Structures are given as structure tokens and as C-alpha cells.
């Protein structure tokens, strides 16, 4: 990464990253909605064991790439929680 030359440069780069993140989250959302069709009940949607495996993997990947594992865990738990809420609505037939 090139060293930013100003605060405006830092912010512009963050905005670019945020744009990519939003596109990736939209892609993830599509898969979450598709997953709802394969799950029998709320417990399948919540899948606490799966959540813990995904968070552990995010922590390992973070450590390997220089991201603080605690930051990764916090972000992933928030993201997963939001997607579980969405999937519960999808599973219940809402939108």
C-alpha cells in the first residue's frame, strides 16, 4: 500500500474499500437468502456451531493477513447477526 499523502487521500481510499465491501455484502446477502430455503427451522438458521466455525476462520485469516483478530471477530459477529435476522425473516416468508 502506498503511503497516503493527506487525510483526504486516506478518506478517498476508505470510501473505495467501503464500496467494494458493500458489493461483497450484497453478494453474501443473496446467498443467505438462498440458504433459507434449505433450512428446516429457526435452529437451522441460527446454527450456533456454524457461527463459531466461521468466526474462528475469520480470526485465523485476519491473523494471517495483518488484521487484528479481535476486530475481525467483532465485525464478523455483527455481520452474521444481521444476516441471521434477515434469514429468519426469509425463512418465515417475509422480505
Image: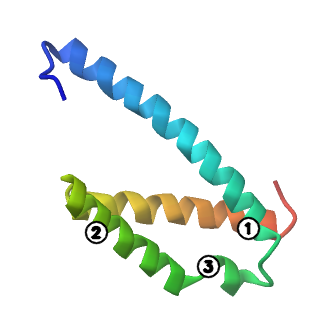
Tag of residue 60? 2
Residue 21, percent from left and from top: 47, 39
Mark 2 and 3 residues: CB-CB less than 8 Å, in contact?
Answer: no
Q: Position of residue 1 (x, y in %)?
A: 19, 29
- Is residue 28 placed above or below 12 in the rendered structure? below
Q: Residue at x 22, y 60 (%)?
A: 64
Number of numbered discs visible in the structure rendering: 3
Instruction: Give the CA separation, mark 2 to mark 3.
Output: 22 Å
Neighbor class of circle 2 (other Cα within 10 Å; few <14, some 14-19, many 20+) is some
Q: In the rendering, which numbered label is found on residue 91? A: none
Q: Of all residues shown, which one is farthest toward the right?
A: 93
SS of the residue under disc 1: helix
Point out residue 31 in the picture as x, y percentages from the top left corner. 69, 57
39 relative position to 81: left or right: right
Residue on which the image places disc 3 = 46
Q: Quadrant of residue 6?
A: top left
Give the mark nearest the N terminus, 1 or 2: 1
Looking at the image, residue 30 lies above or below residue 40: above
- Left or right: 27 as drawn, with respect to 73: right
The residue tagged with tag 3: helix, strand or loop? helix
Amino acid at each position: 500500500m502506498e503511503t497516503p499523502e493527506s487525510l483526504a487521500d486516506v478518506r478517498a481510499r476508505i470510501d473505495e474499500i467501503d464500496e467494494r465491501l458493500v458489493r461483497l455484502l450484497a453478494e453474501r446477502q443473496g446467498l443467505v437468502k438462498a440458504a433459507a430455503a434449505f433450512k428446516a427451522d429457526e435452529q437451522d438458521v441460527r446454527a450456533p456451531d456454524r457461527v463459531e466455525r466461521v468466526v474462528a476462520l475469520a480470526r485465523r485469516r485476519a491473523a494471517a493477513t495483518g488484521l487484528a483478530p479481535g476486530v475481525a471477530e467483532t465485525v464478523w459477529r455483527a455481520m452474521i447477526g444481521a444476516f441471521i435476522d434477515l434469514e429468519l425473516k426469509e425463512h418465515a416468508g417475509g422480505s
